[in-house]
Image (cartoon, grey):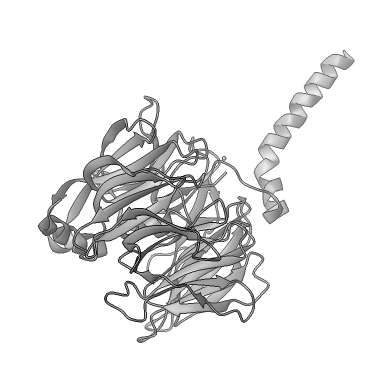
């Protein structure tokens, strides 16, 4: 896509789960009672129960719900949303399936808004208020891999930028600020003990931009890394545990996507060279053996471009998609990548509509399949510019790597949650009215 078209898209995306007979009968009756009562039993057990293969979504009424992929057994996590008074957003599954986190906003006086970070058992039950403020507004939630702690971003008042905060899964330990910066992106270590931080953007435009490692302990301070960040957003800590990926500039490697040791820079390797004026967005496969990325030249605040993949065990990168890719998500098994392109743009200003094309590609052989076009919900449009960060905290893929959830606006302007079969020939399946949905990790 030419620079002019990228410039046009940028404001759009910014804005815009007989004895024998009696025994059998009793078994059937008992089993039926259990099946009927199971949701209630689970809710009483609360966070001790792990949820599998369910979706969480924001309903059109502003409440948070979970539901099975077949549209059955819907559970209301919240019930008190009211237009103009109270609503909920930004749901995120804990990796172990035991908790949900989400943000609520409600009126506080004539002009104020009280925002609250809630933690709730994934099976349903009374949410816990983990953080509340009329000044600091939570807007992005990212669980640690162990599911026992949550990090989140808050927009701070005035010129104070963004704060990275921490809270425990049980909500019993007061939240605390871990770091500040604007912009601020991070990746959890697989053992949930550390974070890889990227603050301040690119060193080319901000001398204070930096990469650092933070041990998630009381009073710990970020430790600066030697590399100077270039034009990218979210760093990645490899699932393998001992490696991280960053885009950096330096005298030895120039501008490059680097794979380096998590604790030292001696074991460092260039994955791909970057244009000095370009930008990159990347995501490591769930297995940690490959990285997919899109690049844009020149950097204009967007990262939309061709999709490539490189092995982290060595070898040359290879181009997968020549089209301009806006965002992509790895399947849990690491075999496929779902990606989005622009199918059509209509209208202007606040009336602008972007129709997305959804495709899936098999990484091993590069076979791509176009799955259709659709008009995404405004909530999902807001995800696209930051997909590289969101890909670490939420997933639209089903755990079996076959199905994918999209958030679609239909012709009658209704907002719907729809399931797409990514490898078979089943027709798209409507499951609920909603504005944004994510699949559970397990």
Q: Is residue 143 left or right of residue 155?
A: right
Q: Is residue 254 above or below residue 134?
A: above
User: Where is residue 113 shown, x and y percent of the image?
Assistant: 42, 78
Q: Is residue 334 above or below residue 278?
A: above
Can residue 194 be seen here? yes
Q: Is residue 336 above or below residue 206?
A: above
Residue found farthest to the front: 252
Residue 143, located in which quarter of the rendered image? Answer: bottom right
Which residue is at 10% across, 58% downward?
A: 4
Q: Is residue 368 left or right of residue 3?
A: right
State how many labels appear: 0
Q: Is residue 12 left or right of residue 214?
A: left
Residue found farthest to the top: 18
Which residue is at 49% across, 41% downward?
A: 332
User: Where is residue 111 shown, x and y percent of the image?
Assistant: 37, 83
Q: Is residue 415 left or right of residue 151?
A: left
User: Where is residue 79 shown, x and y percent of the image?
Assistant: 52, 59
User: Where is residue 261 shown, x and y percent of the image?
Assistant: 52, 60
Residue found farthest to the bottom: 158
Which quadrant of the rendered structure holds the C terminus?
top right
User: Looking at the image, which is closer to me, 238 or 249?
Assistant: 249
User: Looking at the image, which is closer to me, 63 or 227?
Assistant: 227
Can residue 409 be seen here? no
Q: Is residue 414 above or below residue 26?
A: below
């Amino acid at each position: 896509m030419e620079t002019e078209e990228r410039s046009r898209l940028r404001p759009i995306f910014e804005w815009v789960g007989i004895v024998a007979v009696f025994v059998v009968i009793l078994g059937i009756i008992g089993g039926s009672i259990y099946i009927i009562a199971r949701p209630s039993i689970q809710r009483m057990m609360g966070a001790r129960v792990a949820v599998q293969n369910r979706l969480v979504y924001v309903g059109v009424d502003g409440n948070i719900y979970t539901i099975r992929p077949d549209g059955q057994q819907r559970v209301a996590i919240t019930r008190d949303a009211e237009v103009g008074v109270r609503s909920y957003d930004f749901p995120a599954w804990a990796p172990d399936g035991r908790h949900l986190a989400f943000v609520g906003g409600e009126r506080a006086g004539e002009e104020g808004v009280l925002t609250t970070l809630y933690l709730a058992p994934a099976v349903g039950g009374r949410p816990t208020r983990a953080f509340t403020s009329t000044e600091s507004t939570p807007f992005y939630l990212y669980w640690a891999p162990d599911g026992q702690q949550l990090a989140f971003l808050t927009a701070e008042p005035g010129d104070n930028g963004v704060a990275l905060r921490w809270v425990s899964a049980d909500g019993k330990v007061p939240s605390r600020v871990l770091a500040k910066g604007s912009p601020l992106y991070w990746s959890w270590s697989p053992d949930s003990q550390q974070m890889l931080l990227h603050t301040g953007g690119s060193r080319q435009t901000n001398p204070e931009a930096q990469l650092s490692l933070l041990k998630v302990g009381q009073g710990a301070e970020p430790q600066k890394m030697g590399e100077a960040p270039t034009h990218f957003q979210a760093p990645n800590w490899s699932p393998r545990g001992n490696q991280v990926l960053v885009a950096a500039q330096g005298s030895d490697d120039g501008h490059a996507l680097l794979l380096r040791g998590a604790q030292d820079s001696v074991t460092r390797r260039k994955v791909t060279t970057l244009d000095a004026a370009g930008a990159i967005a990347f995501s490591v496969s769930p297995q940690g053996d490959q990285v997919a990325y899109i690049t844009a030249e020149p950097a204009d605040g967007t990262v939309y471009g061709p999709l490539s993949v490189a092995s982290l065990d060595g070898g040359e990168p290879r181009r997968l998609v020549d089209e301009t890719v806006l965002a992509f998500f790895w399947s849990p098994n690491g075999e496929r990548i779902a990606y989005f392109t622009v199918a059509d743009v209509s209208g202007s200003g606040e009336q602008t509509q972007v129709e997305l094309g959804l495709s899936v590609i098999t990484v091993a052989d590069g076979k791509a399949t176009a799955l259709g076009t659709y008009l995404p919900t405004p909530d999902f449009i807001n995800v696209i510019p930051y997909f590289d960060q969101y890909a670490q905290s939420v997933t639209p893929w089903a755990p079996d790597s076959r199905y994918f959830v999209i958030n679609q606006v239909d012709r009658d302007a209704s907002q719907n949650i729809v399931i797409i079969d990514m490898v078979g020939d089943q027709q798209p399946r409507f499951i609920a009215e909603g504005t944004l949905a994510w699949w559970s990790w397990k």
